[in-house]
Image (spheres, rainbow, N blue to C red):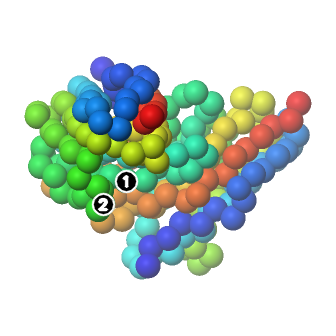
Amino acid sequence: DTEVTQTPKHLVMGMTNKKSLKCEQHMGHRAMYWYKQKAKKPPELMFVYSYEKLSINESVPSRFSPECPNSSLLNLHLHALQPEDSALYLCASSMILRDSIHYEQYFGPGTRLTVT
Amino acid sequence: AQRVTQPEKLLSVFKGAPVELKCNYSYSGSPELFWYVQYSRQRLQLLLRHISRESIKGFTADLNKGETSFHLKKPFAQEEDSAMYYCALGSNYQLIWGAGTKLIIKP
């Protein structure tokens, strides 16, 4: 399996809801990433996990809470979001070899999130 | 500071014409550079990496350290090349992205 999968494809949530995004890969990659992408803009890095530990948090608001329960799964828990958080949320993964992260990242199709 | 610059937001060329998408970078050290492509309604995917010096879908990119550039080229554009193209630089365990160039191939 050489793909990164993400569920759900689309999500509409109110500002008081709690929801989660899920990402899965079975390529044996030990680095996983969450990105936020607005229309016609490059991805903005949110979080990086390496060996299931959070290694980079790009000053993301606490209403976004990542979780990496095992080496294949990555979740993003959402709570009390704002309308400006509406975007495409991308998950990606990459290899780590000899403790060095490879920059070639494999992306999932994304979750289109709308906050009402 | 590390930075990637793609000076053209939009590039429109006719089918069969040559294409060059520009990318300049700022980095102290040996850069690792990539081109990613995002076709309409498809996932972001790696197109080229400078290390491998390969040609994918007819595209090539050469790293020019003197000019700090990594321009993407194709001699004869095809309609299916229409997409958003991002140049990216590997640094500090993450990718630094250019703003992207939307390529439109006119029939």
Task: Measure how far apart labels 1 and 2 are at the Cα level.
Answer: 7 Å
> Mark 1 falls on what kind of element?
strand
Q: Which mark identifies residue A58?
A: 2
Q: Residue drawn 78% across and 50% down?
A: B11
- A43 to A28, vertically: above or below: below
Q: Give the residue number, with chain letter if any, for mark 1.
A: A45
Q: Which mark is residue B101?
A: none
Image quadrant holding the C terminus of chain A, namely top left
Amino acid on which disc 1 is placed: Leu
Q: Is residue B22 above or below residue B58?
A: below
Q: Residue at x 61, y 53 (%)?
A: B100
Residue B21 in view (yes/no): yes
Mark 1 or 2, nearer chain start = 1
Q: Residue B39 is drawn in which quadrant?
A: top right
Instruction: Where is residue B55? Give x, y as percent.
Output: 59, 42
User: Would you say the residues marked 1 and 2 are in contact, meaning their CB atoms lie under 8 Å apart?
Assistant: yes
